[in-house]
């Protein structure tokens, strides 16, 4: 076995050890789902960044940069803007509000905030979380297959099985304690990968007199896009749509449950300010670095190389080609970190929605803390197996990580983002407004993404969020007497 492979296996073993050690810290439902609201600012910030940026950042974004070129730059700006906006608009208020209402989940918060005796908010939001997170988690499992295929040359199906097994096991054992502490380690690895690898790549292509601009022009012939244009060769309204489609990635950050629970779990709302600075300092070089990994990989290997090799494997390919095996092993572990840190969080949030909001609160099952923990672990197994099945299906039909993540990101962001922002910042928001906004965000994402003629005009990430936001506002105005 290569040195890279040995480093990678040591890293995976470390994750499992953390999961086993965290097992004893889970005494209550709040421990398992929110780590007892005891996280410091550094752990909170690194965990939020690691879980927020998944395989999308280390595999899908570089792959998109190769296929699309400079037009993908607007996604970079959108992502960074979304991260900053979420920390400014959501973090502190949601920490204060969920403690005030003693809420452990987003559905629980909405339910208590609006005294929803009908339980419509709780049931519908639980269903949305479970539905879209299954696709999101499956994308992380799918990504593990690609990385392990690149690293060990094993079939991607076996890679998916290995990655899914490890993620499910340490989430099952350690709960949120295991998730956030592994995220802390993974966040360090990820930011190291995203800053050091592109710098090494830039020096390498400079030493070899490779022109990035010439390679971008060559890529246009290979991929059929205007890769050297920030507007993908468009002008007028089409150029504006190109910009909006990229920037729209930022909208989703306002409503991602697996990120919002990080804000809820910090030990004191006063420490949000420190955590915000750390998270932004991580995000700016990290997201730009991911974009540059794609551009540099395309320049180093040449556009023709990615006609026969998957562009979404560019990061592990570049690390293996340019770095010492020990460093390459660590950085490729960083790619797997990105998948695991998101998948474990999403499994936990989906589980919490079903066990806490459906079984415990809606069905009024008065279970002991011990039985609640057993139920949580059982649901993680069930949801993990379903996500594994979706990942296997994606592998068979050839869906890429980018498209699956975009679909889930849009659905979660548009269903919860507008409702949450309006609830936190506009006192006139009503229960009916929140319900209507969730429904429109959910349905618009599903319908728009499955009608090619509409999706060809503009991404569902834009339309679903705007429609949902407008629906929350106008429905609240029409039902103002409800408050």
Image (cartoon, helix red, strand yellow):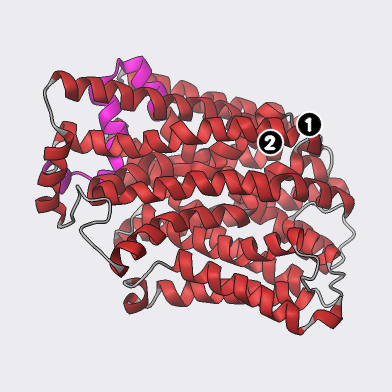
Q: Residue sitting at 32 percent across and 42 percent down?
A: 62
Q: Which residue is mark 2?
A: 174
* 281 lies left or right of 23: left
Of the pair 169 and 344, the residue shown nearer to us: 344
Q: Point out the image quarter for the N terminus.
A: top left
Label number found at residue 57: none
Q: Which residues are magenta?
A: 304-331
Of the pair 358 and 431, the residue shown nearer to us: 431
| Vertical position of residue 58 compared to residue 10: above or below | below
Structural crowding at the residue carrying mark 2, measured as other residues with C-alpha within 10 Å and reported as few (<14), some (14–19) or many (≥20)? many
Q: Residue sitting at 63 percent across and 27 percent down?
A: 18
Q: Point out the image quarter for the C terminus.
A: bottom right
Q: Residue sitting at 75 percent across and 44 percent down?
A: 92
Between the residue at mark 2 and the residue at mark 1, the CA separation in whole angstroms equals: 8 Å
Q: Tag count in the figure? A: 2
Q: Main secondary structure of the magenta part?
A: helix
Label number found at residue 25: 1
Of the pair 271 and 26, the residue shown nearer to us: 271
Does residue 20 appear anywhere in the picture?
no
* Mark 2, secondary structure of its residue: helix
- Residue 352 position in % (x across, y down): 72, 54
Does residue 199 appear anywhere in the picture?
yes
* 443 lies left or right of 70: right
Of the pair 353 and 429, the residue shown nearer to us: 429
- Sooner in the amino-acid sequence: mark 2 or mark 1: 1
Q: Residue 324 magenta-drawn?
A: yes
């Amino acid at each position: 076995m290569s040195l890279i492979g040995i480093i990678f296996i040591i890293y995976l073993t470390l994750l499992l050890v953390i999961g086993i050690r965290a097992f004893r810290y889970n005494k209550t439902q709040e421990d398992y789902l929110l780590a007892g609201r005891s996280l410091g600012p550094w752990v909170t910030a690194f965990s939020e960044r690691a879980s927020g940026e998944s395989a999308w950042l280390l595999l899908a974004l570089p792959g998109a940069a190769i296929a699309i070129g400079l037009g993908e730059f607007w996604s970079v700006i959108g992502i960074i803007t979304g991260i900053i906006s979420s920390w400014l608009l959501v973090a502190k208020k949601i920490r204060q509000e969920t403690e005030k209402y003693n809420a452990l989940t987003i559905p629980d918060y909405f339910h208590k905030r609006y005294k929803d005796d009908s339980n419509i908010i709780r049931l519908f939001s639980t269903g949305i979380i479970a539905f879209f997170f299954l696709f999101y988690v499956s994308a992380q499992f799918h990504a593990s297959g690609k990385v392990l295929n690149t690293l060990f040359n094993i079939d991607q199906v076996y890679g998916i099985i290995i990655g899914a097994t490890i993620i499910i096991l340490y989430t099952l054992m350690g709960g949120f304690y295991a998730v956030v502490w592994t995220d802390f380690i993974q966040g360090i690895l990820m930011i190291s990968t995203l800053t050091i690898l592109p710098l090494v790549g830039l020096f390498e292509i400079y030493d070899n007199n490779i022109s990035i601009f010439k390679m971008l022009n060559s890529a246009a012939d290979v991929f059929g896009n205007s890769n050297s244009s920030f507007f993908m060769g468009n002008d007028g309204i089409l150029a504006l749509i190109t910009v909006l489609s990229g920037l729209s990635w930022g909208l989703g950050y306002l409503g991602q449950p697996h990120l919002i629970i990080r804000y809820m779990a910090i030990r004191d709302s006063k420490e949000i300010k420190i955590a915000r600075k750390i998270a932004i300092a991580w995000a700016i070089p990290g997201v730009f670095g991911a974009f540059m990994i794609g551009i540099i990989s395309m320049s180093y290997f040449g556009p023709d190389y990615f006609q026969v090799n998957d562009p979404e494997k560019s990061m592990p390919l570049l690390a293996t080609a340019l770095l010492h095996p020990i460093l390459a092993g660590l950085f490729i572990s960083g790619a797997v970190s990105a998948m695991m840190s998101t998948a474990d969080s999403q499994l936990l949030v989906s589980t919490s929605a079903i066990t806490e909001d459906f079984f415990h609160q809606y069905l009024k099952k008065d279970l002991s803390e011990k039985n609640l923990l057993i139920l949580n672990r059982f649901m993680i197994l069930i949801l993990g197996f379903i996500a594994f099945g979706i990942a296997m299906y994606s592998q068979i039909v050839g869906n890429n990580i980018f498209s699956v993540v975009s679909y889930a990101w849009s659905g979660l962001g548009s269903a919860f983002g507008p409702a949450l922002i309006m609830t936190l910042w506009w006192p006139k928001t009503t229960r009916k407004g929140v319900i209507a906004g969730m429904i429109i965000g959910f349905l618009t994402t599903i319908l728009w993404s499955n009608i090619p003629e509409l999706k060809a005009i503009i991404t569902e990430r834009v339309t679903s969020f705007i429609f949902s936001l407008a629906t929350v506002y106008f429905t609240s105005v029409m039902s103002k007497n409800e408050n």
